[in-house]
Image (tube, helix red, strand yellow):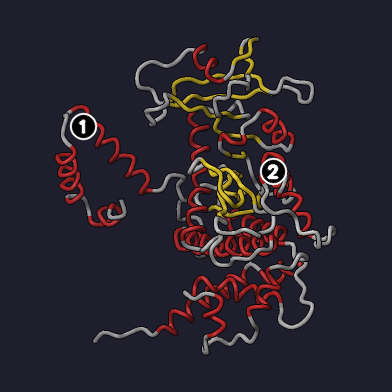
Amino acid sequence: MNTIIPNNDSEKKLNSTINRFFKNYKVNSLLRQSNFRKEKGFSCTLIFKFIFMLIFTGKNLFRTLDSSNTNINFSKDTVYRFLKSTRYNWRKFLLLLSSSIIKNEVIPLTSEDRVNVLIIDDSFYSRARSKSVELLANVFDHVDRKYKKGFRMLTLGWSDGNTFLPLAFTLLSSEKEKNRICSINDSVDKRSNGYKIREEAIKKSPDAMIDLLKQSVACGLPVSYVLFDSWFTYPKTLIKILKLNLHTIAMVKAMPKVFYTYEGKKYNLKSLYSTIKKKRGKAKIKASVIVQIGEDEQAAPIMAKIVFVKDRNKSRNWIALISTDITLTDEEIIRIYGKRWDIEVFFKMNKSFLKLAKEFQCRSYDAMIAHTTIVFTRYIMLAMESRNNTDLRTVGGLFYHCCDELEDIKFLEAIQVILDLLKCALSEKLTLTKTQINDFLDYFISTLPSFIKDKLAFL
């Protein structure tokens, strides 16, 4: 006889998971350290936890408060007052939470040989239908290649190749006043945390990025490299990061006015590639060269290694990666930079499933910062649940010496690469059609053992 599991069971399981997360990682204590103090009425932890759980109940704020099943006695005005407070230090809370998890939970189960990285990237934070949002600006969206109303969400995260945890972020407006639709609220106390993050919002993105890095370095996290895309790759930026005792691995954009010194002469990226000797044939790594960057009065020159890699995109022949650690091999530079993809998955998860920029439509800049921090906290809980369910060594000391560390490249990703190479080989060597190739792969997969076949069902 089939049994129907009541909804109460799933709700109890959800509440148990959330309560365990708040207890294990001492969320209440971290909130107090970040200046979360109630003036009157309900505690900050209670309101924070209520907002945190909204996405998992399948209801919006109004429906949840209107429900007769809830034990919450406060109104929606209490929630919005909490979100719009300028006293709370949301940046400190997120940094304390992530750093404590990394030091106490992740690092003890990670080998010393594992390369840990900081990843920096920005994503468009849309407020397309807004008119009166504080610091709203016309910012450039790199995906659609046009200006839109909203913010650039500059995010800094930590990754060991398996688990990505956000450390800090800022919602950048525009450093150009003519691009800002709304200005800073004059009534905000200039001594408050809210005003400090507003000042940071109108900085240039490279300067804001350095500020985020300085705060993360102060936490003493185990990090070897900083990874980011070509939008931030300038010689001055690389030198500033090196002064923080961090090496950089980044993609390089072919800019005509950015020069690199090679054998006593200065070249831009395109002329440098045409000058050096390339590998023959179909080699994926076309060339690599050690150059000197940063020759000006403001910064001393440093050595860097540029690796030219074959690009799959037919519109370009190559892409370039730069590393300030010249001791790394070409293959290591490419492998480490591959970890940057973790932040793209993070952005997709937050926007598609955790209602980033969609759950609340406040006009206050503080409310957007608060909401984004809560969404990132939800992701942290899900990331740790996923790791605990994947890495058996997190169960206890029994599995610590018996289980291998999680691989940098997951099993499914490796199978996907093998199948793609097999398709190319069948197409080029045997000149088979797509239908014939697909029929062959279906037959090949059907003959595999069942445990591999189940994993291939995701591909």
Tell us which disc is closer to us: 2 or 1.
2
Q: Residue placed at 61% from the left, 50% from the top? A: 153
Q: Amino acid at mark 2?
A: Lys
> Going by the image, does 256 lie left or right of 274?
right
What secondary structure is marked by label 1? helix
Query: What residue is disc 2 on?
Result: 178
| Distance Cα–Cα, label 2 vs label 1 | 54 Å
Residue 397 visible to an observer of this rendering: no
- Give coordinates of residue 138: x percent, y percent: 61, 47
Residue 261 or residue 401, whichever sits in front? 261
Query: What residue is disc 1 on?
Result: 427
- Give coordinates of residue 96: x percent, y percent: 69, 59
Q: Amino acid at mark 1?
A: Ser
**Rendered image: mark on residue 358:** none
Q: Quadrant of residue 70?
A: bottom right
Is residue 81 shown above or below 149?
below
Is residue 190 shown above or below 284?
below
> Going by the image, does 255 lie left or right of 308?
right
> Going by the image, does 365 lie left or right of 450?
right
Badge 1 crowding class, 10 Å Cα cut-off, few under 14, some 14 to 19, many 20 or more, is some
